[in-house]
Image (spheres, rainbow, N blue to C red):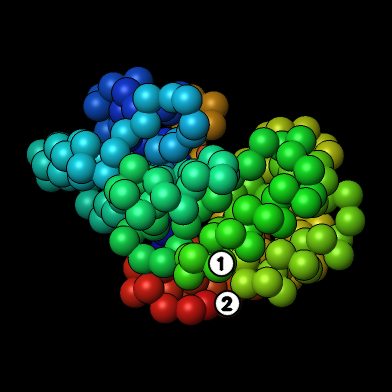
Amino acid sequence: MGRIFDIHNHILWGVDDGSKNIDMSLRMLKQAEESGTTDVILTPHNKPNRRNVYRSEMLELMNMLKKACVQEGIGINLYHGNEIYYRMDVGERLENGKAATMAGSHYVLLEYNPMDDWDYIKRGADDMLARGYRPIIAHVERYVNVMKDVERVYDLTDKGCYLQVNSGSIMGNFGWKVKSDARKLLKEGVVSFVASDAHEDTKRTMRMDKCIRYLAKKYGEDFVTTIFETNPMHIINDEYI
Ligand SMILES: [Fe+2]
């Protein structure tokens, strides 16, 4: 196993409901490193009617974190992104720097309300695709109106969306229904990314090692490499998967 990317997490401190301070962020990164993660795309929430961290501020915080990592001997590569809550103005927000794509690429991590209508979810994906972005649908296992029909999942991937599932969902940390839905998606072979969506250092943590072992046993080492290294490298290099 080469590199292991975590493409969805809330490590950046004081900007959303994730890490509370830089010490917690460093503890989270230490846990990530201990469990084998080598590369992290920071994805603070970007939501309407909230104080959102703009790209410039995010880069400043990321650089502080990079320096702190060097001092603490943490050898993880950091990149910046956002978990963007879909609203009609997302395209504009991306264009004027009020929301960030993933590591400066054409990929965007897109989040919806778990109860959003199927039509609304589809429209959001179409909007991003029409603007030339490549949507990664965050924790797709949570959207009731996608999961109720497997054809909808294929609708999203056929359009050109990529699906991300949370490691905690696969391991049953959010109940049996979410676990069974997450595992169904894996079985269907439609998942392109698995990430921690870590918010802190005790419950929703950066540790993905247990999940990676489960996936390796169930789907093989090549699958694990695709999910945690090959596909994320396509984001970094801004290439199609
Ligand atoms: Fe998240």
State the residue at coordinates (27%, 33%): 26
Residue occupying image coordinates x 31% and y 49%: 96
Give the label on residue 222, or none: 2
Residue 21: mark: none
Q: In this image, 149 relative to 55: left or right? A: right
Q: Earlier in the sequence, mark 2 or mark 1?
A: 1
Relative to 177, is 125 on the left or the right? left
Q: What element carries label 2?
A: helix
User: Is residue 168 something that shows in the picture?
Assistant: yes
Which marked residue is nearer to the observer: mark 2 or mark 1? 1
The residue positioned farthest toward the right in the image shown: 149
- Residue named by callout 1: 129
Report which quarter residue 71 is drawn in: top left
Which residue is at 76% across, 35% downward? 115
Write down the quadrant of residue 174 in the picture: top right
Which residue type does callout 2 highlight? Asp
Q: In the image, is 220 to the left or to the right of 141?
A: left
The kind of secondary structure element at disc 1 is: helix
Where is residue 106 drawn, in percent x and y?
Answer: 41, 66
